[in-house]
Image (cartoon, rainbow, N blue to C red):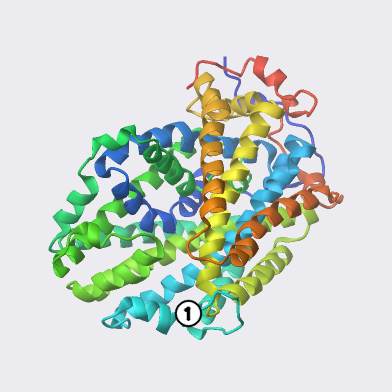
Amino acid sequence: MRIPVSTQTAIPREGKARREQFAGRWAFIFAAVGSAVGLGNIWRFPYIAYDNGGGAFIVPYLVALLTAGIPLLFFDYAIGHRFKGSPPMAFRRLSRWAESIGWWQVLICFVIGVYYAAIVAYAAMYTWFSIGERWGDDPETFFSADYLQQSEGVTPTLEFVPAVFWPMLAVWVILLVILGAGVKKGIAMASLIGIPVLALMFIVLVVVALFLPGAPEGLNALFTPNWSVLTDPQVWIAAYGQIFFSLSVGFGIMITYSSYLKRRTNLTGSGLTVAFSNSSFEILAGIGVFSALGFMAQANGVEVADVVANGIGLAFIAFPTIISQAPAGAVIGVLFFGSLLVAGFTSLISIIEVVVSAVKDKLGWSRWATVSVVVGVSGVISLLLFSTTTGLAVLDVTDAFANNFGIVGAALVAVVVVSWILRRLDGLVSHLNAVSSFRVGRIYKVLMAVILPIVLAYMWISDIVLKATEGYGDMPSWFLGTFGWGMSIALIIVAVLLSLLPWSQKSALHSELNDTLEPEAAPASHGRHAANSPEHSEKGV
């Protein structure tokens, strides 16, 4: 039997303010898609698919989506919606000893945000460069020597690069305005405008790319299946890694966004929409990117395998080469880099909002005051580290450790703590089933409590071992120790320290109404009441 949401017992909070909310479910879905569809969808997925079996990669990819991506997305939604708070406050309401997990996620977002702004700035400048094909005949030299003015060493300097500094400053100013405007008028509005524009630009880009000479060869390289790879464990790990990193799960974004949902919101239905929209965009990106790479290979008389690249190399070196050789190259350039700009910016909004929400909840400040401080501090650090001649080296190392050590580690700890230590998974399942159209049950709990910890632990430990034994690229040990290992360990220490700070009476923990808490949510019950409640059903997935 399922009890309607309206019959749930809410703890009365007379005189307390309500949390900011999205205007409706679709505003939330657009914002969540805006967060999930980011740079990795465009420049990471096509290469990962190609390098791990081509068309055969779709099998482990879909398995990973159904057994890890969507369950973890539901997990984040349930925590954020039920406990109505940023990651620290949501985990604090779950258990006072779990607050540090939330702060770890917040600090990861802070680190990612300060370097992500640099890549958004690169995309903005390259959208402009595309019109006149400013990179000339040698895009690689232009990117490293002319545009970034890259230093030969990696020791951080204060030699600012104007073409990076000013667009980065503009990114932070625009971010200040959007986040200051709030959830409805800022975050939701940016996504409601940005996502349709992104979809339109990228669809046009794909159509144009499909008509380039050599496009069929590129698509054959991407989609021709190599079924033998399905017996390779590394291919499956690559699939889980791609799903995990592309859905914006595990580091506080979806917890924060779902905390802005109204009490009556279809969580699992929204999650399925977001997940499949994200995956559809990734496949679309694969088609567009490999059509263009097929053209590049034919134009240079080489195989597609010889021109395949990913990440920054694909975006700022390979694609400018394609643009210079293709008919209507300027149009392709504006569409490609414009797509990177919009996708990156909507993701950046969600990343920094996690930090804003956490500080606002903890200190009880107004939104504008919080946004001014968070964006101001983040912007200054971002400009000092990433708009200089050594910015790309710092970005490379920080990105590698923040994602693989930080996000995976924080997600692993959150899943294990909630499922096995606090024993609160039953309560979250009950909440999902009480408000959602797609119900979950035994299978979901097995995936969350058993499968996900195993996959995340393997990914986390194997990456730590790899970096500890082989280092990272050709970076010196002191550089890795500072911006890699040192940064990663410091985040955990600072997270614990922040969790020890008391919540003031004007903080959101004490001043905001939480109308979704049920009797089960009392810490003493630890989920046992929900496991036996009539609304809990084992008939779900």
Q: Is residue 202 above or below residue 422?
A: below
Residue in the picture at 71% in, 32% down: 517
Q: Is residue 524 above or below residue 270?
A: above
Circle 1 — which element?
loop
Residue to which mark 1 is pinned: 150
Image quadrant of residue 433?
top right
From the top left corner, tell me how far across and down residue 88 is, in percent: 72, 46
In the shown orientation, is residue 540 left or right of residue 333? right
Q: Seen from this angle, which residue lies furthest front? A: 469
Residue at the image position 39 percent from the left and 33 percent from the top = 63
Looking at this view, is 459 or 431 the one in front? 459
80 to 108, vertically: above or below:
above
Inspect this view and state whether residue 258 appears.
no
What quarter of the picture does the N terminus occupy? top right
The residue drawn where x is 67% and y is 59% is: 486
Q: Residue at x 41, y 84 (%)?
A: 146
Q: Position of residue 204 (x, y in %)?
A: 26, 61
Provide residue 188's location: percent of width, then percent of height.
53, 55
State whether residue 475 appears in this view.
yes
Q: Residues within 10 Å of mark 1 (few under 14, many from 20)?
A: some
Q: Amino acid at mark 1?
A: Gln
Please state which of residues 478 and 13 is positioned toward the viewer in this rendering.
Answer: 478
Figure disc tally: 1
x%, y% of residue 134? Answer: 32, 83
* Residue 216 higher or lower than 297, as above or below: above
Rendering quarter of residue 197: bottom left
Q: Nearer the viewer, residue 457 or 10?
A: 457
